Image (spheres, grey):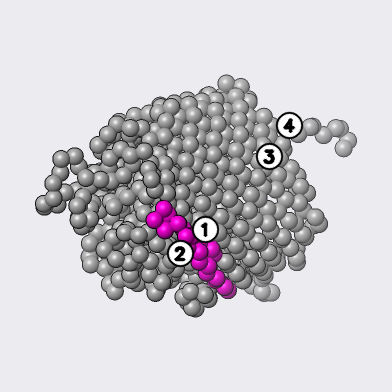
Amino acid sequence: MWGCRTGRTAVLAMLMLAGAVDEGRAQGTGATPLEGIIIQSGDLGLAPSDSGTSGTAVTVVSGEQLRRQQVRHVSDALRLVPGLSVSRSGNPAGVTQVRVRGAEGNHVLVMIDGVKANDTPTGEFDFSDLLVGDIERIEVLRGPQSGLWGSNALAGVINVVTRGGKGPARATLTAEAGAFDMRRVAMALRGGTEAAWGSLSFISYETGGYNLATFGSERDPARQSSFAANGGFRLSPFFSVFGGVRAMSKSFGFDDFGTPPGAVPGGFTPQILVDAPNRGRKETRVAYATAQLELLDGRWVQKLTGSFSESDDRSLLPGFTFQAGGERRRLTYTSRLAFEVPGLSGVKHAVTGLAEKEWEDFTTSNTFAPAAIERRRLLDSLALQYTGEVGRMLSLKAAVRLDDSSAFGRFDTWSLSASYTMKPTGSRLHASVGTGVVLPSMYEQFGEFPGFFTPNPDLRPERSFGWDVGIEQPFLDGRVVVDVTYFDQDLQDEIFSSFAGPPRNLTGRSDRRGVEVSGRIKPMPGLTILTSYTFLDARDGDGLVEVRRPRHAASADAIWTFAGDKARVGLGVVFNGRMRDVVRDAFTFAEGRVVLGDYTLVRLTGSYRLTEQLELFARVENLLDQRYQEIYGVNTPGLAAYAGLRLRLEERAQASRPGR
């Protein structure tokens, strides 16, 4: 339901909105699990698994594919993934939500290099915080995953893996500019051996922005930068240590919803977005360190990881300041033992276990309540997963997890999945079933915003049960692969927030069901076409259609490489069907509903490698110059063109001397 997540995020941001693999085998943004594509998140990162044997619906997006498509924000790449819907509340630095299969933004767990990235105050991840630069791959697991991953994985997991440093020393420098006074610079340096490796990256993004408001002409600028470093050492054949740090800082302008000029009370008068000199600032910092022990020739892998993350989010308005911050500390032990039973050749087994302790701290203050509210929650977790594989024909997974929260007591979750391949036709059946849970956010429990939001410390966790079943079918010797998946998921104890009172658990049951279709087509060498379609029927406990989720969504993305791999042309199309949104009365704040029209976004890209080191690239976004809204009242950019240069420097391996 709209009020339970989007409304809270709007208050926090003071927006008052409504109150891979190589190209030859890349899955990219299609949903079809293809042979050779590895899922690193399958067993908590302890061992990679082949997506061709996954019973869970999964999409793998390679970093190389993102760069070839010239995608600059991860949220734009996720628009091409079946089952996902994206809502951006303003310019590229504005709050950006991603919903999986019609669920809420905090119903998806986001992991970056094994560290939970969901914001502590709100429980969800703001995807505007994540720029494409040093990303190696994005893995999207759909369906309830709490049986292994815990809270927030109610509808799925988005696992982001950044580039490591192993391999020859190499450096890249990218600079581009274009519409809306946009300027972007990205730098990276990485390299190492199996014994020691490291990586550094930096991205700076700045735009003069465009006018967000329905009434007014002020441009809303944005500035964002991120830094990341990671590395490690293999101290012995069986013991290694590695870790990393990340930092992000951004500032942006935003407007307010207000009363239309000349409006008078009476009837229903929708609010409109009007120009305001508001500014938002946010900083995040993450650090982690891991010790890994590999025994029994790598069959037994153990990890001990300590991680720390913090965020500070501020909204600055004339005469008013709002702040929300949070810290999360985690100590995680994971272990995976792979084994085979004598006499059963080709049958592989693995058992994965987890023990984890988490500390969450929350603080908030504002001009009307300057004394900071400070709260803490603790969470202890145990999880166990079994994996069984019979060749590449049959794969089974079963997981169970027990969590003990200082605020909500004990709760358990589970999941099952299976994949079976029929050799004569290559058809692959896959299915999964499981339960999910999401704890109330720290802000829902403890936040305070006089006149707008009152917390509820007695909230219960949201719970869900869901399942899916699908078939993957290759055609024409694998040049065409199609996957069709049906999913069904319910939500109980849904948390609803509004200006009328504190958040509360609803008594009804929300239902989300639909169909995901994806395909990969390789009609000729050098040309790859990825397609997706989603039908979604998501309704709240009263039977009303959930807002900001289109009933129909589709995408197609084609990349053609030619001229000896020097030239590349790409065409991407995203269709977003009609969807509903919430609007409030300018005088009473009563809620109403509006229908946002459908839209089609076309992206044209091109690049040419001038030398082995230098590449020229350009792109046009919103080629059809569509006028559309993802959120009621918030304008979006029109036709825009960009161009830039990319410089690559790489250490070349020396040829071996004769006789050596």
Verify whether residue 366 appears in magenta.
yes
Tag 1 near tag 2, CB within 8 Å: yes
Image point 58% across, 67% down: which residue? 358
**Mark 1 crowdedness (10 Å alpha carbons): few <14, some 14-19, many ≥20:** many
Nearer to us of marks 1 and 4 is 1
In this rendering, position of residue 222 left or right of residue 646: left
Give the secondary structure at mark 4: loop
**Mark 3 crowdedness (10 Å alpha carbons): few <14, some 14-19, many ≥20:** many
In this rendering, position of residue 298 left or right of residue 183: right
Nearer to us of marks 2 and 3 is 2
Rendered location of residue 76, percent (x, y): 42, 42
Residue 478 or residue 333, whichever sits in front: 333
Residue for badge 2: 442
In this rendering, position of residue 626 left or right of residue 456: left
Q: Which mark is residue 652?
A: 4
Q: Amino acid at mark 1?
A: Gly
Give the secondary structure at mark 2: helix
Tag 4 near tag 3, CB within 8 Å: no
Rendered location of residue 421, percent (x, y): 48, 61
Tag 2 near tag 3, CB within 8 Å: no
Distance of label 1 from label 4 (alpha carbons): 45 Å
Q: Which mark is residue 326?
A: 1
Magenta residues? Answer: 360-382
Question: Which of the marked residues, 1 or 2, is nearer the chain's N terminus?
Answer: 1
Image point 88% across, 35% down: which residue? 659
Give the secondary structure at mark 1: strand
Verify whether residue 67 appears in magenta.
no
Tag 1 near tag 4, CB within 8 Å: no
Residue for badge 3: 190
